[in-house]
Amino acid sequence: MLPHYSPYKVAENFLTLEALHPNRIDLGIGNSSGGRMINRVLNEEKSERLTYKQQVKDIVRYIAGERSENHRFPTLTATPISETMPEVWMLGGGGESTNIAAFNGTAFTFAHFIKPDGRGSVERYREHFQPSIFHSNPFVSIAVFVIVAETASEAEQLARAFDLWMVSLETAKNPRYFPSIDTANHHSFTPFEKQKIHQIRKRAIIGNPKQVREEIIRLAEMYHADEVTIIPNFPGIEKRMAGIRMLAEIIKQYA
């Protein structure tokens, strides 16, 4: 989340990673500061703050090793300098980020986990895309919540914890921990919370590996996406790892 950092610091960190692991590093950029209070804390004692558009422009310049006499720091070069560059992605949910990604010629990740239908946003990115040192053509991924387990019923149990977590976040209850399945099973959802869950579920894929694979393919085809990024937001690191492995195995079988 770029508002948390200096563009120069981000560029140098990822150039270092790229030097150590060429062609294996992705730099994903987002615009959320985490809320009004966090934004105040991050910018305490700062008289000015760069716009997100300028922050992205700076990172692109530093990553690509470009120089410009019109820049605030015309002689500054981000290091280390290597033969390859990190893959730059911009996350967007239909707002300004879509246009910024297109203008800078970066790859674009649409936040389906925030807004469940962004085909218009993706098409706008493709329509206005400008070739760059990063990409000669538009490159799109879709990011979606995924809850996967061996059976559909087990996935639904995991999803109840996901429901409680998301409802708590979106009703400003600010949970400190991801709820357990047991906690979720003992929670009585209010009519308002059930309505919220109905909307939240549109941003997630839930089921057994076969069901999830089919939905991922459907989503990719709907957006004509080059990649799909899954967000396995369910309780238990072991269950997450097992779910990802099962999904990877069934995708590999049909590859």
Image (cartoon, rainbow, N blue to C red):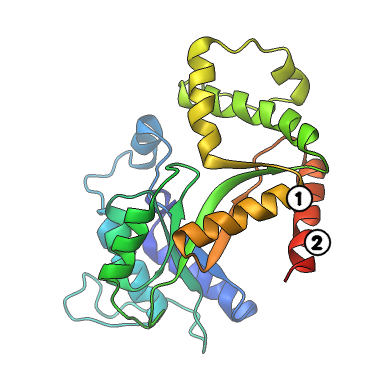
Q: Which residue is mark 2?
A: 249
Quick one: label 2, few (<14), some, or many (20+) residues within 10 Å? few
Amino acid identity at mark 1: Pro
Amino acid identity at mark 2: Glu
Q: Determine if residue 55 is in view.
A: no
Query: Which mark identifies residue 217?
Result: none
Query: Real-space Cα distance between discs 2 and 1?
Result: 9 Å
Q: Residue furthest bottom?
A: 83
Q: Identify the residue shown where x is 57% and y is 56%.
A: 218
Say which quadrant the C terminus sits in.
bottom right
Marks 2 & 1, CB-CB < 8 Å contact: yes
Pointer 2 or 1: first along the chain: 1
Element carrying mark 2: helix
| Residue 41: x %, y % from top left | 38, 36
Quick one: label 1, few (<14), some, or many (20+) residues within 10 Å? many
| Residue 24: x %, y % from top left | 62, 75
Q: Which residue is mark 1?
A: 209
The quarter of the picture where residue 248 lies is bottom right
Foreground: 51 or 173?
A: 173
Foreground: 59 or 91?
A: 91
Q: Identify the residue shown where x is 53% and y is 60%.
A: 220
Describe residue 102's horizontal placement relative to residue 250 as left or right.
Answer: left
| Residue 194: x %, y % from top left | 54, 18
Please, is residue 153 above or below residue 203 in the view? above
- Looking at the rendered structure, the number of numbered marks drawn on it comes to 2
Foreground: 186 or 23?
A: 186
The quarter of the picture where residue 164 lies is top right
Q: Determine if residue 54 is in view.
A: yes
Element carrying mark 1: helix
| Residue 118: x %, y % from top left | 39, 50
Q: Identify the residue shown where x is 42% and y is 42%.
A: 115
